[in-house]
Amino acid sequence: MMITNTSKQQHLAAFPPPRSCDTFVFVGAVACPGLSGTLFGKNSDRPSEENHEVIRIPSSSYDEGSSVECTFIRIPQARETLDCILSKPCWMWGCEMGANSFGVVGGNEAVNTLLADELLSSDGSPTKRLLGMDLLRLSLERGKSSKHALDTCIELLEEYGQGGPCCKEDSDWTYENSFLFADAKEAYVLETAGISHWAWERINAGEYRNISNGISIRSNWGAVSKDIQSICKENGWWDGTSKFDWKHAVGAGGRAHSNLEACGREAAGKVHLETIAETSKTMQSPPNARWYVEQMAFILRDEESGICFRDLMGFCSTGSQISWLPTSSDVDDSHFFTAASDPILAKYKHFTFADTIRSETDDYGSNELWNIWRSAALQRLHVRSGTLEMLSSVENDALAELEIQRKNTQNKSLSFAEAIRKEIDLLKRNE
């Protein structure tokens, strides 16, 4: 397949380049005896006016032949879907990040490759298929391990393809996707190109990885899609004899002097993870789970590097998630969501699947909280120091749950919904 359609490429060049979202994982982080686990975190950076919500989708069973309506297309439904907590733009079916009750977490990123013009119709508009966010939700609803989620995502990508407008207010904006799936034992980075090409890389226990809107898998891939090497050879992006370098081929077209090293937010994120890993080794005793989650919160609040976006009218970190997945089967997974824009001001609230399911597609008040924080930002409302202290106590209480959490134990302080309600009440009293 030679790339020859210059009109499509010119149209695609007008799209805003991927410049948002950062996802992190540290697999098998050594913590207190018996409490090691995987640390996961992501900022969802989207248009600042785009409402974001956190919803729980209970597990369900379906009849043979059932279908599910995704953002743009309908596909066959699985016979069984898993209990999920999802952080997502309100307008779309899919999610930016989330977790399921089997201990799998995931996030997706926008990327751009030399095959991106495959996403366009003959008139230059994006062809509606599965959004990357749809693929992520489907993988979390069906994947009982990170490898299962990876395999599910690849299967759906190959069957239905990716594509479609990625913003409700901009029908021309589309992109390819990368994904990070993780559980307590391992993690996988999956990067895509065009409609259905892909490569994946495994992250083992003791290793860490981050993705930041760029192709990052090199020649250390575990597998690549069936025809991608022949496509790259045909286009002169790979010589057909050297070890196939995914990023060098689909990202840089095989150019000899391409700068393929991590830069910008990706490089900053890598340094952050290296710091966590090295610091944990030099501590007098292994840190606890709370320490790791606090380190991830620090990363996701890093405005200087661009990991945290705070643009009032452009792109903003519209949602943020941190997860701790313990290796011990005696301890519940713990998930933390801001359920609001700007993780520097909004606080992380604790969620566990042991919490009672209140209703179908429960948003826990996250829509209301998101809108209150957005209104405060637009009005440039000053959050008083006393209010900030009380908001910080909400997060401190949430983090304290990590020190006492055991299997099937509900929050000792505030439930996820109660923590959101408390933050709403504090902000209303601040007005």
Image (cartoon, helix red, strand yellow):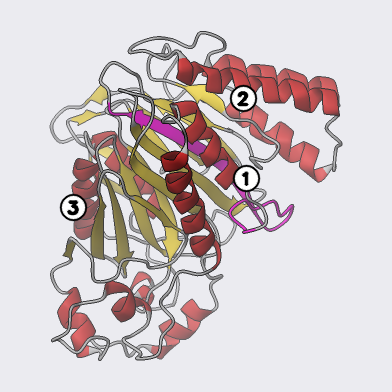
Q: Nearer the viewer, mark 2 or mark 3?
A: 2
Q: Which residue matches tag 3? A: 155
Left/right placement of residue 172 relative to residue 223 reads right
**Above or below — where is 227 with respect to 287?**
below
Q: Are discs 2 and 1 less than 8 Å apart at CB?
A: no
Residue placed most toward the observer, 49 or 34: 34
**Above or below — where is 124 with respect to 314?**
below
| Tag 2: amino acid | Glu
Q: Which residue matches tag 2? A: 395
User: Counting other residues with Cα less than 10 Å from the Cα at mark 3, is it few (<14), some (14-19), or many (20 or more)?
Assistant: some
From which residue to which does the magenta span run?
305-327
Left/right placement of residue 129 relative to residue 264 reads left
Q: Is residue 233 visible?
A: yes
**Above or below — where is 91 with respect to 387?**
below
Q: Position of residue 12 (x, y in %)?
A: 47, 77
Q: Tell me the quadrant of the picture where the C terminus can be found.
A: top right
- Disc on the earlier residue, 2 or 3: 3
Could you tell me how far apart the alpha carbons at marks 2 and 3 are, in whole angstroms? 39 Å
- Disc on the earlier residue, 1 or 3: 3
Q: Quadrant of residue 66?
A: top left
Left/right placement of residue 62 relative to residue 25 reads left
Q: Tell me the quadrant of the picture where the N terminus can be found.
A: bottom left
| Tag 3: amino acid | Glu
Q: Position of residue 377 (x, y in %)?
A: 78, 42
User: Counting other residues with Cα less than 10 Å from the Cα at mark 2, is it few (<14), some (14-19), or many (20 or more)?
Assistant: some
Q: Is residue 89 visible?
A: no
Could you tell me how far apart the alpha carbons at marks 1 and 3 are, in whole angstroms? 35 Å
- Asked whether residue 322 is drawn in magenta, I would say yes
Q: Are discs 2 and 3 less than 8 Å apart at CB?
A: no
Determine which of the numbered discs, if any, sits on residue 301 in the image.
Answer: 1
